[in-house]
Each structure stands twice: as C-alpha cells, then as structure tokens.
Image (cartoon, grey):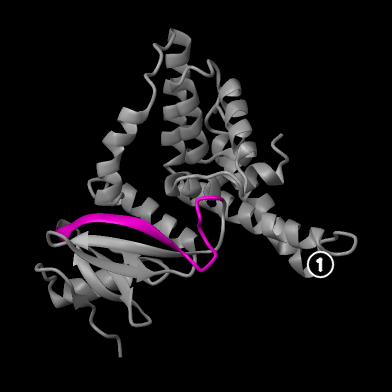
Amino acid sequence: MILKPVQLGREALERDVLVQDRKSCKRFGPCGVGERALYLGGFSLSCRYYLPYSEITRVFKRVAMSKGGFSHKGIFASIPYLVVEYGGGREKQCTYKHEEQVDQLLACLKQTHPEIKQVSAAAEARQPEKEREQLPKPELTEEARQVLKALKEAEAVLEKRPDLYLELSKSARAKRQLLLKAAQRRGGAVKAKEQPILDRAARAQEEMEQFLNGYEGFPLPARYAHPVVLRRMERVVEAGRAVSPEQALEAVKAGLKALNASVQVSQEEHDEVVAVKAMFLNEDYR
C-alpha cells in the first residue's frame, strides 16, 4: 500500500493529481521534483510530504559538519540537508546521505522553477555587506568585457546539462579518495576491484568532451568544465587580474593550490572548493 503524501502547506492537490504527480516525479534521494509539487522525505520514507510550488519561498542546501568537521580551515566530513521555506517563514529540513543528490535536485529545480530562491535569507542579507566590503572593481577593457561575456555564455551552456558537470565533480572526488587511499598502501597500486572508480571518472570526462564538441571555442577543457570554475574565472577577470580565459584559468589554479587545511575559508568558499578542487588535483593542475 502506497501512503498518500502529507500536505504541508495550505494548498492541497486533488488526490488523483497528487498520486500521479508523485509517481512520475524525478527522485533525488529522499525527495522528488514533480510537475505540480516538491516532495520531501521524512520518518525514513521518501517523498512523504508535498508542497505545491506556489507555496515555496526558498529551497537551499544546508551543510552541518560532523564532530571534528568544518572549522573554516579545510574540507571535512559533513551532513547535508535540503531546506525548504514556505508559508511565510515555516521550514522543512530533509537529511541526505549524499551531498551530490541535494545539488542534483537544486539543479533540476533551477531549470524548472527559476523563480524559487536557492539561498537562505541570511545568506541573501549578507550579500550587500559582502559587496560593500569588496574593493572597487577596475574599469574593464573591451577585451576583458568580451572574455567575461564568453565565460557567462559558457556557464549557460553547462547549465543545459547539470547532470554532466555534477557527475564530473562527484566522480573526481571519488577518484581522489581512491588515489589517496592507494598512496597509503605499499607500492601505491589501485586494486582490481577499485578500477570501476577510475573508469567512472574517465567516462565522466569523455561524456563532457562529447557534449562540448558542439560548442567551438569553449573556454575550459572538459576535465574542468564546471560552473564554479567559470564563476571563479569571471571574478578574476572582473578584478582586473586577467584579460584572457587562459590567464583567468591559471589564476583560478593558483588560488585553489593555495587552499589547504591551514587556510581559513567561508562556508560559501568551502562549498566551491569541495565541488571542483579534486578535478584539478587529479590532473595535477595541468
């Protein structure tokens, strides 16, 4: 017997519509993205609750660090949550085992419902303060403006296939963990049963390369093709530190190399580094 999802907000869907929408929703861990509503897990049951999109104010990721975890000085184990705000301030939080599933759900939701904010109210309130703290940006040359335009267009290209860049990131992190584990063994060899992890990372790169073949002049090699990398390159150009994609990428590489366990970072910076640094480490920043 399939339990009927529990209504969280004021708006209810008709039973037949609700049943069909939940059945056909795209599942990401314990939650799902339907055409009519967002479905949330609870009490060890997936898609136990539902909220029509008209009632949702924000959907965002929250990361709580386990004991000995995030201390603003590195990348550690974390507990990811999907947080949904609705009904004038009410909140529902869903626990995830795998952070990439939260990212996948948010990427899907961004495509289908871009009007729903994906940052917390606190993070949104801090944004103007961050902007005031930033040094004045230099006036850009025409060449720099064209580079910035190309980077933003490239970001839009990747957002057409979030599944590809999310898999590129996830498989790179799995490969990095494997290589570190293998390095601790005598001889540093990867065991035969671990080969699928390397194959998965190679396959993710190949699929990204095939996708980008249709976009001549893409400003990133496929192995680093992630929106976070492009946004960091954009910030480099805006700061006047680069006037070409090649210079911007080298600056991004230098910045990532400098980040280690002794460097203090914000939660936002932590999330960016977790998403992309393994891709660069695996390739030795080439």
Return the residue nearer the eye: 68 or 224: 68
Residue placed most toward the observer, 246 or 167 = 246
Q: Is residue 140 above or below residue 1?
A: above
Quick check: is 129 in the magenta stretch? Answer: no
Q: Residues within 10 Å of mark 1 (few under 14, many from 20)?
A: few
Q: Quadrant of residue 32?
A: bottom left
Q: Quadrant of residue 49?
A: bottom left
In front of the other: 103 or 70: 70
Query: Which residue lies at the image location 52% right of the left edge and 30% below the top edge?
Result: 215
- From the viewer's perspective, tell me whether residue 160 is left or right of residue 74: left
Would you say 55 lies left or right of 66 here? left
Q: Position of residue 47 (x, y in %)?
A: 31, 74
Q: Kindly give the residue lying farthest to the right in the view shown.
A: 187
Image position, residue 152 (x, y; %): 42, 28
Picture residue at 81% right of the left edge, 66% below the top? 191
Task: Decide: is 240 above or below 276.
Answer: above
The mark tally for this picture is 1
Residue 43 % position (x, y): 33, 82
Question: In this orientation, does residue 35 appear?
Answer: no
Residue type at numbered disc 1: Ala
Q: Residue at x 56, y 45 (%)?
A: 276
Residue plotted at (33% across, 55% down): 60
Which residue is most to the bottom?
A: 1
> Disc 1 designates what residue?
192
Which part of the image, by quadrant, shows the C terminus? top right
Give the residues drawn in magenta, as a range.
55-73
Point out the image quarter for the N terminus.
bottom left
Element under disc 1: helix
Would you place residue 78 above or below residue 276 in this image? below
Q: Position of residue 267 (x, y in %)?
A: 44, 49
Does residue 283 appear to the left or right of 17 in the view shown?
A: right
